[in-house]
């Protein structure tokens, strides 16, 4: 079962208002055999246009992290940089590559 936890919001102005919501998605690896969790993120952006129109865009990537602290650090980065759904995949890829490079670096 998949739950969503609203973690934060941001607003952008680009000729019209855009509200962005950031969700943390916790998920048990196996209900029957372990309490281990994995975490993903979801971004929902609602654009409000003059005249009452609106558009909703959603992007979700699950199973990115196995530690809650890593997932929370990442989602704070998304909020701070006001990442939109369209750029979520690129940001995730860059974050993973940077994390791997840090892990390989000599101490």
Image: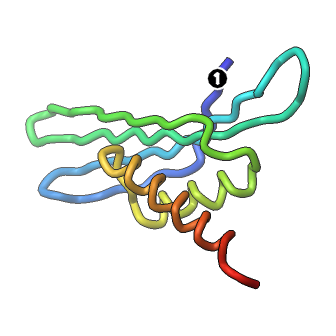
Picture layout, residue 36 above or below residue 72: above
Residue at 40%, 38% (x, y): give it: 44
Say whether residue 50 is left or right of residue 12: left
Report whether 103 appears left or right of 81. right
User: Which residue is pictured at 66% across the width and 40% down the height?
Assistant: 39
**Disc 1 element:** loop
Q: Residue at left 61%, top 64%?
A: 100
* Image quadrant where one finds the C terminus: bottom right
Horizontal and vertical percent position of residue 56: 29, 32
- Residue 105 lies in what quarter of the image? bottom right
Q: Observer-nearest residue: 19 or 62?
A: 62
Q: Position of residue 48 (x, y in %)?
A: 21, 41
Q: Is 63 displayed left or right of 90 in the figure?
A: right
User: Image quadrant for the N terminus?
Assistant: top right
Is 61 drawn above or below residue 32 in the view shown? below
Numbered label tally: 1
Residue 9: x and y, percent? 47, 51
Looking at this rendering, what residue extends furthest in the left direction? 51
List x then y, in percent, for residue 16.
16, 51
Q: Residues within 10 Å of mark 1 (few under 14, many from 20)?
A: few
The residue sitting at the bottom extreme is 107
Instruction: State the colouring used for the structure image.
Output: rainbow
User: What residue lies at 67% left-to-right and 46% top-to-bottom?
Assistant: 65
Q: Quadrant of residue 82?
A: bottom left
**Based on the displayed image, in which of its 4 quarters is residue 4 positioned?**
top right
| Foreground of the two, 53 or 66 | 66
Residue designated by label 1: 2
């Amino acid at each position: 079962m998949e739950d969503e936890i609203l973690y934060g919001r941001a607003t952008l102005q680009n000729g019209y208002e855009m509200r962005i919501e950031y969700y943390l998605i916790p998920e048990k690896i196996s209900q029957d055999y372990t309490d281990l969790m994995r975490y993903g993120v979801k971004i929902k952006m609602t654009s409000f246009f003059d005249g009452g129109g609106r558009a909703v865009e959603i992007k979700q990537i699950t199973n990115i992290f196995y530690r809650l602290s890593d997932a929370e650090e990442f989602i704070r980065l998304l909020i701070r940089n006001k990442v939109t759904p369209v750029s979520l995949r690129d940001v995730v890829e860059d974050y993973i590559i940077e994390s791997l490079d840090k892990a390989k670096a000599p101490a």
